[in-house]
Image (cartoon, grey):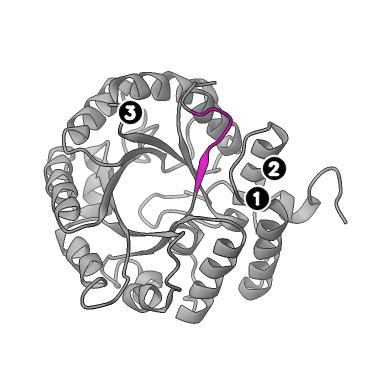
Amino acid sequence: MSEMNNGTVSIVEVGARDGLQNEPEVFSTETKVELLTRMMDAGARRLEVASFVHPKLVPQMADAEAVVASLPDRKDVSYIGLVLNKRGLLRALATREGDRRGVDEAGCVAVATDSFGQRNQGQSIEDSIRETSEMLRLAKAEGLVPQVTVSVAFGCPFEGEVPQARVLEIIQRLAENEPAEIALADTIGAAVPQQVSDLFGPAREKLPEGIRLRAHFHNTRNTGIANAWAAYQAGAEVLDSSVGGLGGCPFAPRATGNIATEDLLYLLERSDVSTGLSLEDTIATAQWFEGVRGKPSASMLAKAGPFPARG
């Protein structure tokens, strides 16, 4: 275990953004806000609340501004808005105009392959690094916390294996812009724990201490929870997860959900790792959303419950 973790890890709840973006049914603004509020009540303190992308590409996110405007003004919570380009960043910044709270963090996205970059945001790797670097600097100058995710860091649906050396070079170049955090994303759920350890260890060593290292895993091939544990042991200070295991990427064929927040909490809680989230309240939120969605979640804990049984 990395000394930097010290028996604790932070969780970023991504259910309302990454979790919902691939759902065929477009949920109401009120439903999204309730989902976010329930997870705040469960203890989530950083949440992806929306993505500022073209509504024709991701219809689920067409109400991004309305969602942000409806969120409670809680000082103990940080709201993350995903932005793929400068136009999206300007929309995120506009949520803070006047006396409005708006989003707190700009979640930028860089890509580790040209093919995925062209399909996801119309950019090559070099285009992505250049524009993301500009966005990180602008976000910081305008008072947002700048952070960035490197997508398809462990495998690309179009190019296959992604060289580790390339990913390490990308994060080193992005680190020059002094983001608060860099995340490595297994966008298509291709990674296994050894691969995660082999990448996160060197990544932690190459990043300055002031930049947090975050991990984002999908459970497409049923390795997501094991990968999260490997990332934590290799020095990741922050883990992404989605209540109920919701999720998928509209631009990655056959990509399924994120790791379920409640499944991750069970692993961490039983391993004496503190997160600040309530397992029972998270399970209850997953079960509530099953009713809203009208079908079961991918979560194991929503089905089996915790062990030992409580109450």
Q: Is residue 246 left or right of residue 63?
A: right
Which of marks 1 and 3 precedes in the sequence? 3
Residue interval drawn in magenta: 5-11
In this view of the protein, which residue sits in the foreground, 98 or 128? 98
Residue under numbered circle 2 = 266
How packed is label 1: few (under 14 Cα within 10 Å), some, or many (20 or more)? many
Percent position (x, y) of residue 106? Answer: 28, 55
Mark 2: which amino acid? Answer: Tyr
Q: Is residue 132 left or right of residue 284?
A: left
* Secondary element at tag 1: helix
For the residues carrying marks 3 and 2, which lies nearer the camera in this image?
A: 2
Residue under numbered circle 3 = 162
Percent position (x, y) of residue 89? Answer: 20, 61
Q: Quadrant of the N terminus?
A: top right
Mark 3: which amino acid? Answer: Val
Q: CA distance from mark 3 to mark 2?
A: 31 Å
1 and 2 marks in contact (CB < 8 Å): yes
In this view of the protein, which residue sits in the foreground, 203 or 300? 203
Magenta part mainly helix, strand or loop?
loop
Could you tell me which residue is drawn at 45 percent across and 62 percent down? 22
* Secondary element at tag 2: helix
Could you tell me which residue is drawn at 53 percent across and 77 percent down? 31
Residue under numbered circle 1 = 262
Asked if residue 10 lies in the magenta stretch, the reply is yes
